[in-house]
Image (tube, rainbow, N blue to C red):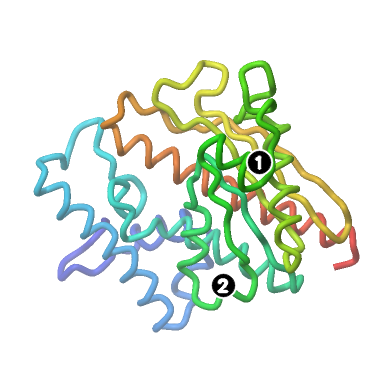
Amino acid sequence: MHRGAGGKIRRGGRQFLERRLDLAPLSNLSPPDATRILTFVRSGFAGCRALYAQRGKMSGPQHPCRSFGCRTTGAPLNPLLIHSACELRDKLAMHRSRLVLAESCTAGHIAATLGCLPGISAWFCGSFVVYRCESKTRWLGIPAAMLEAQGPGPVSAEVTHLLAEACLGETPEARFSLAITGDLGPRAPAATDGVCFLALCDRITGSHFARRILLAEPSPTSDTDIPRRVARLEEATQRAIESAIQWIQTAASSNGG
């Protein structure tokens, strides 16, 4: 953790944290703010070390404690995700606009990350967690034929776009909707393994944005490979939030703010 004597974080640790969180130098922050950030990150490392020390998994190539926090329990939450969630909240507040989600592969993780922010209800309406095909059809009206083998399938640009449109239609107070589908593995078909589709709709301008992403994290090797599964879940969540920030700015700018 880049600690020196007495548990203090050395200069290298500060620089590492600043790079990973894309923050201004911590020395430029007020002492209370800097202390809160460093304490939060320290608690993530400490909790993860304690958990894996008990399980005898503190070393080796499968060690899942990467970056910050514990990837097995999800608590404390990854500060990188929290930082991005704050950016998204600030972007929505800047444009006085609300967001609704339709989540498939992330299973509500985007919503859970946003829900960590106090006061987020001013800008976040909620999430339709449509993990199974049946839920996509019954809750958001996606035609069953589109989800079958002869159709585009549940992990596709077409279905993701329909999910974004449908959840926006169900949420009159939202200006923006974001939908995500994907296959996090294991046993995913080669064509969709690690692939995610994102779609965002803007009610005011009628703009639609879409993106196909390929996750960098490796596929889980089995149903018990929770660390890799969670690593992919967090990456999908991070990239979805980053895309939403970019798209909301683009859509709002085209409408004059």
Query: In the rendered structure, which amino acid carries the disc numbered 1?
Result: Leu
In this orientation, which residue lies closer to the viewer: 93 or 135? 135
Q: Locate residue 44 relative to residue 161 in the image: left or right.
A: left
Q: Compute the Cα span from label 1 to label 2.
A: 22 Å
Residue 120, label in figure: 2
- Location of residue 6 with respect to 167 vertically, above or below: below
Rendered residue at 59%/53% (across/down): 241
Rendered residue at 66%/33% (across/down): 212
Residue 198, label in figure: 1
Query: In the rendered structure, which amino acid carries the disc numbered 2?
Result: Ile
* Coordinates of residue 60 in the picture (x, y in percent): 20, 32
Q: Locate residue 229 relative to residue 54 in the image: left or right.
A: right
* Coordinates of residue 197 in the picture (x, y in percent): 64, 35
Q: Secondary structure at mark 2?
A: helix
In this orientation, which residue lies closer to the viewer: 157 or 170? 170
Locate residue 248: give its quadrant. bottom right
* Coordinates of residue 28 in the picture (x, y in percent): 50, 76
Rendered residue at 53%/49% (across/down): 129
Name the outermost residue toward the front. 138
In this orientation, which residue lies closer to the viewer: 241 or 29? 241
Screen quadrant of the C terminus: bottom right
* Coordinates of residue 174 in the picture (x, y in percent): 73, 64
